[in-house]
Amino acid sequence: MSRPAHTPLEPASAVLSRASGPDANGPLPSARLAAILAPANPPKLKFLDKLIAEQKEYDASRVRALTDSEEFSQLIRALNFAAELREWSQRRLAAKIGLPKSTWQRVCQANVNPAEWLPRLRTAAARLRTNVEGIESHGPIA
């Protein structure tokens, strides 16, 4: 008697891994060959979806950080240019902004977090009526 290809108690993978008897090295039966060549359903790779979402979030935060950094340096240049036009010292500019001179120097040297200081610098530029857009053509002022 011939044994069926697989019994309901055995998984299909057990049948595929079992030798086919005395002619194990011979050609594979067509059902077994079809099972081997059939495209397997890939496992659900949820971690890849999560990884892609995290990468998109990281990219968006990186863009925000670069934009903040550019605006930060632009505001610093505008405030320094405004002080130079009015012939103010750095100490007087810092006082007009409402900061001690040492803190203003740290801000100018970018030793602070731009995201934290942007609101203060925006307020200072508005208070001093500084034209931030026009400063780009003048270049950096040290």
Image (tube, rainbow, N blue to C red):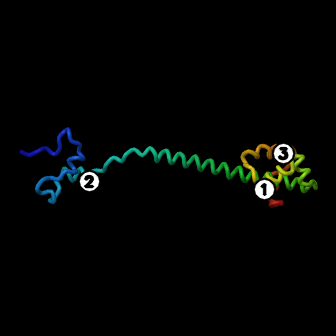
Q: Nearer the viewer, mark 3 or mark 1?
A: 1
The residue to which callout 1 is attached is 109
Residue 95, how many percent across, how many down? 89, 47
Which residue is painted at 90% across and 52% down in the image?
91
Which residue is painted at 74% across and 45% down in the image?
116
Query: How many residues crowd around disc 3 within 10 Å: few (fewer than 14), some, or many (20 or more)?
Result: some
Q: Check disc 3 and give the amino acid type.
A: Ala
Whether residue 133 is visible here, answered yes or no, is no
Look at the numbered disc 2 and give the secondary structure of its residue: helix
Q: Residue furthest right?
A: 87
- In this image, 40 relative to 52: left or right? left
Look at the numbered disc 3 and give the secondary structure of its residue: helix
Q: How many marks?
A: 3
Look at the numbered disc 1 and give the secondary structure of its residue: loop
Q: Residue furthest front?
A: 102
- Which of the 4 image quadrants contains residue 139? bottom right
Query: How many residues crowd around disc 2 within 10 Å: few (fewer than 14), some, or many (20 or more)?
Result: few
The residue to which callout 3 is attached is 124
Whether residue 127 is visible here, answered yes or no, is yes
In space, the residues marked 3 and 1 are separated at their CA atoms by 17 Å
Q: Are marks 2 and 1 in contact (CB under 8 Å)?
A: no
- In this image, 126 relative to 88: left or right? left
Residue 58, how many percent across, how many down? 59, 48
The residue to which callout 2 is attached is 37
Marking on residue 131: none
